Image (cartoon, rainbow, N blue to C red):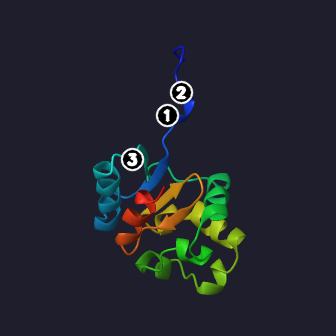
Amino acid sequence: MPEGCDTARMSPKVTIYHNPRCNSSGHAVRIASELGVDAEIVQYLKTPPDATTLRSIIDRLVDPVTDLVRRDDHWKELGLSDVDVESPEQVIDVLVRHPRLLQRPLVVTKDRAIIGRPKERVQDLLSSP
């Protein structure tokens, strides 16, 4: 590392778990860019978060943990129900096995994590000190 280099400035201050095919997810990335936020963009379908990462996110999550799991057609195809995602450990297990079910966008800062729906939540989080 170059002398005098500030490591805090080198690491992103925000991580956005993103699906390029999702409008809400794209909105979160655009908002971060417009605000000049140094964000790491993780295409979670290509690089899914592991159990340790999901635990760290859940520790900061301001939303109910069960909201991390999408209830879409894939959810139905898998035959899952709300009973399968009642606890943080169940949510982690389901998302590790089926990353496609991760709610998006997921915006994670040092202190907080949110599901970026409605879209205004992303701007609120990234604009706060």
Residue at figure coordinates x 68%, y 53% from the top left: 52
> Are discs 2 and 1 less than 8 Å apart at CB?
yes
Whether residue 98 is visible here, answered yes or no, is yes
> Of residues 58 and 90, which is closer to you in this image?
58
Looking at the rendered structure, the kind of residue marked 3 is: Val
Q: Which residue has dot 2 on it?
A: 6
Q: In this view, does 32 lie to the left or right of 103?
A: left
In three-dimensional space, the C-alpha distance between marks 2 and 1, rounded to whole angstroms, equals 6 Å
Looking at the rendered structure, the kind of residue marked 1 is: Arg
Q: Which residue has dot 3 on it?
A: 37
> Of residues 72 and 110, which is closer to you in this image?
110
Question: How many other residues sit within 10 Å of disc 3, few (<14), some (14-19) or many (≥20)?
Answer: some
Q: Which residue has dot 1 on it?
A: 9
Q: In which quarter of the image is the N terminus?
A: top right
Residue 82 position, x and y percent, is 60, 85
Examine the image and state in which quarter residue 18 appears.
bottom left
Q: In this view, does 47 lie to the left or right of 36?
A: right
Residue 51 position, x and y percent, is 66, 56
Residue 123: image tag: none
Residue at figure coordinates x 51%, y 66% from the top left: 114
Looking at the rendered structure, the kind of residue marked 2 is: Asp
Question: How many other residues sit within 10 Å of disc 1, few (<14), some (14-19) or many (≥20)?
Answer: few
Q: Quick check: 12 above or below 10?
A: below
